[in-house]
Image: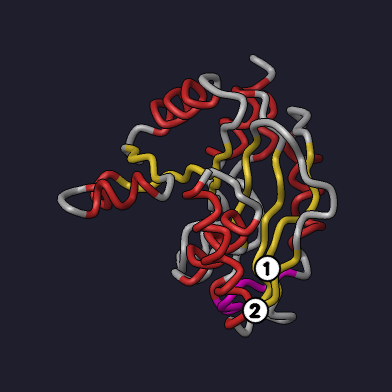
Amino acid sequence: MLWDSIRAAIARAFWRLSSWRLVREAEPVAGPRLLIGAPHTSNFDFVLMLGIAWDARMRIHWLGKRELFRGIAGPVMRAIGGIPVDRSNAAGVVEAVVARARETDRFLLVVTPEETRKGNGWRSGFYRIAMAAELPVTLGYADGSTKTAGLGETIRLTGDVEADMDRVRAFYASKTGVRPEYRTEPRLSDEAALTRQLAGE
């Protein structure tokens, strides 16, 4: 479509002019999936995310707090894939996103699991969504140490949260983010408890 071509042209121009280098996906994955954006250390991450997605002609969705969609900003945010959510209702967010994911086989959701500048680890929402909607997870990244950004491996979550997160931690161990001082380790608050919860124990 014309809009996809325009966005791809914008992305190509961005990567040509940027001091950052794009690392494209080695083996593009077809179908719906969840893309992690990490380490999330700067508002510039959003620009890199769009550059990655638009270059690959992905029609991505991303979650944003409802306040971002008020007034004239609302149509703009939705046009670039934004989905307004009530972050005070975590269960409702997961249910709403799972419902959207099941509507189309082209659903691509970008999630930034860590809180910018908080240093409190990662939120578990991405894991719950991926498991509930049976979505593979692609590890997207920004690495300030090499000034590269792109999409890494795609994994299938198993429900063994600690084992899955060990794999995620290994991938991001060398990734610093745009601002390394704000990087947090990919660790959920209680991975063992989440494993038991997902198993219905």
Q: Earlier in the sequence, mark 2 or mark 1?
A: 2
Which residue reaches farthest front? Answer: 2
Seen at 76% across and 40% down, the residue is: 29
**46 relative to 69, above or below:** below
**162 relative to 194, above or below:** below
Label 2 residue SS: loop
Seen at 54% across and 73% down, the residue is: 182
- Identify the magenta region: 175-181
The residue at which mark 2 appears reads as: 20
Seen at 41% across and 50% down, the residue is: 80
- Residue type at tag 1: Ala
- On the image, the x and y values in percent for residue 107 come to 57, 32
The residue at which mark 1 appears reads as: 149
Crowding around mark 2 (Cα neighbors within 10 Å: few <14, some 14 to 19, many 20+) is some
State which quadrant residue 126 falls in. top right
State the scheme by which the image is colored.
Answer: secondary structure
State which quadrant residue 163 falls in. top right
**35 relative to 169, above or below:** above
Seen at 53% across and 38% down, the residue is: 125
